[in-house]
Image (cartoon, rainbow, N blue to C red):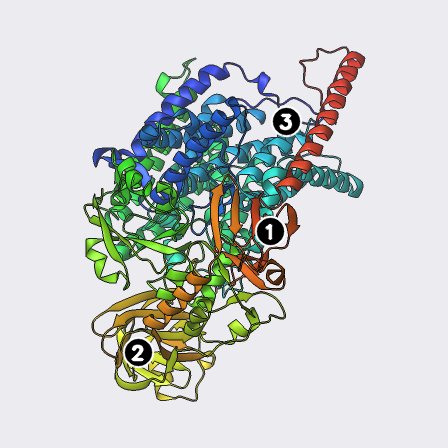
Amino acid sequence: MIERTTDDRYGKKNYFGYSLAETTRKGRYALVLLGVCAVAFAGVTLTLIVSGRSLVWDTDGRLLYFPFMVAEGEWLRDIAVSLLAGDLAIPLYSFDIGFGADWLIAASGNSNEPINLLAALCPPEASEWLYDALVFLRFYLAALAFSFYCFSRGKGKGATLVGALCYVLCGYILFWGVLRHPNFIDFAVFLPFVFMGADKLFVGKNPLLLIVSMAGIFVYSIYFAYMTCLFLLMYCLITYFAYPRERSMGDFALLAGKFALCLLAAFALVGFSTIPMFITLTSMGRVGIVRDIAFFQTADFYESFASVLLGNHEAQSASVLGAIPVIAILALFVARDSMDERERRAWGCGIALCLIGALIAKVGSVFNGFGYPTDRWEVILGFCAAYAAVLLVPAIPRFSALQWRRLTALVAVVAVWALVYAFKEGTLLGFATVVMFAGIYGALALWAFFRRRAAGSPSSSLPRVLTERCLCALLILAVVANATVHVGLFMSPLGSSYCKEFIRAGHVWGTREQLDLSSVLEQLDDTYRINRTDTTYGRNGSFVHGYKGFDFYSSFYNQAVDDFRQSMGLSDDVKSTMFDGTRQRAALDYVLGAKYYISSTEAANLIPGGYVKIAELGEAHNGLSYELYETDRALPLVFTYGSAVTQQAYEELDLVQRQELLTRALVLAVDKAEGTVPRFDTQREQLGVVEVDGATVQGGRILVTKKNASVTFSLSGRAGCETYLCFEGLRFRSLPVSDAERLADEPQLASDDLAVNPSFTPAKTCWVTVSDGARESSFEISTSASPKYAGKEDWAVNLGVSEDPVTSITVTFGGVGIYEFAELYGATQSVEVIRENAERLQEGNAASVAFGNNAMTVSVEAVDSTAAGENREKSRYVFVSVPYSEGWSATMDGESVEILKANVGFMAVEVDGESHKLRFSYVTPGLDLGLACTGIAVVLLSVFELRWVRHRRTMADRRGTSEKEPIR
């Protein structure tokens, strides 16, 4: 366990930058680590194993990670087949994801995740087992990467093994990774290599490891790459000032320049991924959105902090460390002379910064790109705590009696802090974590006591149980047992029953498929879309089954689609990252091509008028029976408009009038258009307050003084119409009941005039339910402090079609507080008028479409084949209900033509009255530039490496050393 202490080029102790070749028997260590990781992994997933659950989380796992992993395997196999056939085809675009989306962008974090490449070798039906195996593989690789980092700093194998286990059993890897987002573990795999590369640069070694590891993070996630750059900044500053070095302004500037060049090289090296992703990120509205973020955490957070560090958590938390890492952190403060002083100060400083950061909510926002606060960044806390455990192992035998007393006092403070919260919370997990913490520390102190006694005896050798090897074994046992217990209690019915959120083992494939639609889809017209009344078998269902649909879920989305949906006030989801359907709005169903509907029998009442059942789809894996419906009213994905209006004119309309406009004229994002806004059948309905329960309606706001308060409004209504309730500019602020009552009593008082109540924890989201007595619809709204917040403030709630006029609407508010709005109104829209408008568009349609790989071919017929000369003077628009993107280009009869942004989020091309052939082609925006950057970076880096090797050989010859000996 003795640190190697070779000298660096300045003749001073070298703390890092060791070659891994200097660590012997690495293969044996890797096998031991594999066995220990397998035991630890089995321990933390024991509850899932016993309850017969897989590792696929029934939210993002089912909707994102598993289907995208399977799709990546199919994608890679298709590319391989095309290559072997001599006709290489790389699909970049999928018409089946939402309204259509870039496959590489939408699946980012999965398609660019290197470990998922193994899916190409796995039959789809066996993908569940591959998914679980890859989770463990990532878990093990993270432990191995941390071990290599420790070896590069001259640490012994026993201490390193203890630290590696602490690392992979920290809250980030367990709760953000293993038990939620497995690909997040990749970040924990790359991070130690980034720090190893930084260490090499500090001692003048080859920067290739830093460049390649950073490139790995860049290609996996720009989000985590940004986080890594912040980590690297602090790591380098601490390293520069904490360890021996001939420091000067020039040296600091030179070193900073080297690091900047390495990061730039890493970014350019994977430019084929980073540049398209950067373009997408900067285009998304949820990035950079203004949020109201508190500087400090809540009072409950501070009360529970020590308890959470030890493993007591009601939800997934990256702050969880466990007993041994917490003891190691405390030991840093008392281990003077028992640990290397520079190491102790450097890592103590790093941990102190992490702990202070965890206590400040704003820090979580900064690390999240100034978005909502998150604790994902606390992977660095887990890393530092794990390294503190590595430092602790050889220091324990050297602790003096005074140091043990001081450490015991610190342990007691943490234990009491956690115990107080355990009594307040009253959960088994809360008490169990304190008992385990005290028990493990007591056992450690007892071992040290007997070790000191034995060391003072005249006997020449220590009993085996008191050797450092045995200490490492005991610490490993403690780390694994501690994690097994606290994770097991959290997952079990004795805790939060979190295990129920995972799909049953052996059922993942069936849960993904739900329905066998293969035979049905072959008979349907693929120039139309299939809508759904509900998402009971999951979003991204259209992508899974291979049909053009309406539902979507991915962290990376096309902002044009979100703009369109927000302009309509579609009330399906508060987030921009997911959407499903059109909320059965006839106008949108017809214009966007919803010729078909899939519905469970339970939701059949939501099927819009004009749809007829054409097939029984049978029972799905979820136990519900499904049916297929069809209408002749929907327009295909490509059709022609005879007139157009500007988007400015469109935006001056209310939320419901806008959708009627789409059935009459094309909306263009231009300054001028020849068409004029027509007169609308849609009528705005004035609302009157009829009854209130727990709420007060004031000018521009509704004060809610109890949960599930309601307000009933009256309106005139019209028969045979869709009836809407519309909020524009709706904002929610959670308030204590007393404050809400005060505002209700004092209408002149503004919410900003209220004093802040430090003991009140405001709700970040709430539900609003709208009902006409026969049908109801709910939507969720959020405050800017919520992770879900995407700036959505306009909501148009469709209550469906009624034969009789709807004259009363009741709104129920789920949260206490103030609901402010710019406008609140009702609206009625005749479905017969919408049908007639759609029929006129169908009659005038002269376009047809065929879909290909990253392309569409559109044929446009002439308006009047007998008057070719006159046709050239006529103007019309070919509308394509595929999302607008800079990646699309178009040609008409072989000549380049401009693609216009139409209907807010889609595409159109202006043509004359002649027949034409249009071809739309897609390339991921920024991909060409990114490939060029990658090519240049590869060439430059290769030249640099060749020169480096030549320089190394020259230096070796001058010094008379072997080429294998490290040159510093």
Q: Which mark is residue 705?
A: 2
Judged by depth in the image, the label closer to the viewer, 1 or 3, is: 1
In the image, taking residue 548 as reference, residue 354 lies left or right, namely right
Judged by depth in the image, the label closer to the viewer, 1 or 2, is: 1
What amino acid type should be assigned to the residue bearing mark 2? Thr
Residue 254 percent coordinates (x, y): 77, 39
Q: Which residue is mark 1?
A: 886
Separation of disc 1 and disc 2 at Cα?
48 Å
Q: Which residue is mark 3?
A: 17
Mark found first going from the N terminus, 2 or 3? 3
What amino acid type should be assigned to the residue bearing mark 1? Glu
Q: Residue at x 53, y 38 (%)?
A: 220
Task: Give 62 or 213, whichever is nearer the viewer.
Answer: 62
Residue 828 percent coordinates (x, y): 34, 77
What amino acid type should be assigned to the residue bearing mark 3? Gly
User: Is residue 395 at all visible to an observer of this figure?
Assistant: no
Q: Are marks 1 and 2 in contact (CB under 8 Å)?
A: no
Residue 282 percent coordinates (x, y): 58, 54
Q: Which mark is residue 791?
A: none
Q: Residues within 10 Å of mark 1 (few under 14, many from 20)?
A: few
